[in-house]
Amino acid sequence: MRILRLTRRALMAATTAAAVAVFSPLGAQTPPNVLIVGQIAEPKALDPAAVTAVNDFRILMNVYDGLVRYRDGTLEVEPALATSWDISEDGTEYTFNLREGVKFHDGTDFDAEAVKFNFDRMLKEDHPFHDTGPFPLAFFFSAVDSVEVIDDLTVKFNLNAPYAPFLSNLAYPTGLIVSPAAVEANGADFGRHPSGTGPFRFVEWRSNEAVVVEANPDYWDGPPSLEAVVFRPITDANTRTAEMLAGGIDLMVEVPPVALSQFEGDAFHVVEQAGPHVWFLILNAKEGPFADKRVRQAANYAINKAALVDNVLEGTAEVAAGPTPPAFAWAYNDALEPYPYDPEKAKALLAEAEAEGAELTFYVTEGGSGMLDPIAMGTAIQADLEAVGLDVNIETYEWNSFLGKVNPGLEGEADMAEMAWMTNDPDTLPYLALRTDAWPEAGGFNSGYYSNPEVDALLEQARVATDQDERARLYREMQTIVQDDAPWVFVANWKQNAVTSDRVENFSLQPSFFLLLKDVVKN
């Protein structure tokens, strides 16, 4: 195939571009109409039901579609593979009318049976392809009792209760629709052989080198402008910056704050976009020093978050006050003030808890989705905690290895860990990472084992409330309790960024933090 040959040449050109630039004052040139993207890490999988990292989502959103999607520049839902839908009066039935004539990249038909296959595979343990998981964000659809095929182009979801985030969760990558035939053909290896209905179709994945996708000329929403996209994992931020400056890549995501000034001038375009992001430290509330709330509060007082934002992050973020990002204005509790920097208060709380000199193991990652210069942040945090008398040992891991250490839980392993979430609804982060039933052994992401029955009850009530004002009240009450309990150190809310070369046009960042490349043009 012409595109396959072209993208292989593009890959070779991209991987040698920085070396060429060393010998050429004009730098390197990547191929025309092929976009080379510098990613922050190797993807874990290309199965949307099996991954959680925005790094992976940035590829998946270009290969697959969901029933609905976020409208450009917003977190508002609009039709995609479904052209319309009806919701029952009691909020427990969602009936979707599907787009006619859509095919998966493998040539099979998209229809109601394909939709049912996707959700049954994720939610039903007795499904013949359930073992192709794991399905870490199946929580998003825990309210689904059954999926019913009405006819080829009509499908109905029956919920066990009203579930306010349902449509928003369908627009999230977990709701993307994969080809049943491809899953049946590849089984547990489907994540290396993806097939969707999106604007780009999979060509190849060369481990630790590149994922290559090509334009889908039959895309239902019009063919992409680009011929192909090459996603290159460049885990070291300094190397990624050097590659961008040298011309080895056309688009770089998550530019280190200290590097932004290097992209001033006509040769580059820096793009920024606010979104629902929170960067925090998970504290092990089950065992060790942080099992005591006073020690958790002491950590929040001890860390100079304003200095981190101003000096390490170069003003590209704001200090966080709690677990809910202010981008969710309707649900955000703006009466909460961030923990002030007060090392004396921290020392007093540590003395009261008899925790002076406590030894802490701190997991830090080299880089990952929304992690905000994590090594520099981790080192500064270590210094602040040691200044109030704690003994902090940092262990550093590559992103996927880091997730493999943190997601199973900190019990018996560490006292604290960096983490960042970009979310689609005020329900998502607290429901998946703060509920008692979201402890790791239950399949959730509450890696610090925080538990408060009052918080659990508020979250359960909020997700079934059909009135948004009532949902907002419940979330604000939850934020007040969580801030006081301090299961995390609430650090920063980030404004995402990216940089493109001047050869790239029509690129914008999304508040969802996804990377949508269908309309991008490269000269």
Image (cartoon, grey):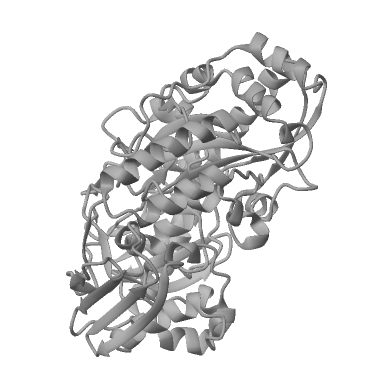
Does residue 508 appear in this view? Answer: no
The residue lying at 58 percent from left, 65 percent from top is: 207
Image quadrant of residue 472? Answer: top left
Vertical side of 164 occupied by 271: above or below: above
Residue 327 horizontal/vertical position (percent) = 33, 37
Q: Is residue 195 above or below residue 66?
A: below
> The N terminus lies in which quarter of the figure?
bottom left
**Vertical comparison of 404 with 434: above or below:** below
Please tell me how many numbered marks the rendered image carries.
0
Residue at (59, 28) in percent of width and height: 377
Q: Position of residue 501 (x, y in %)?
A: 31, 42
Identify the residue at the far top of this view: 344
Picture coordinates of residue 171 (x, y %)?
Answer: 32, 61
Q: Measured from the top left, where is residue 99 in percent x and y?
A: 19, 78
* 130 on left or right of 379: left
Asked if one can make out residue 210 in the rendered structure from this viewpoint, the answer is: yes
Indicate the quadrant where residue 294 lies: top right
**Which residue is drawn at the image coordinates 32% and 82% (left, top)?**
104
Q: Is residue 384 left or right of residue 186?
A: right
Name the residue: 19% across, 74% down. 220
Relative horizontal placement of residue 521, taking residue 204 as reference (left or right): left
Left or right for 177, reference 279: left
Q: Nearer the viewer, residue 417 or 212?
A: 417
Q: Name the image quarter holding residue 81.
A: bottom left
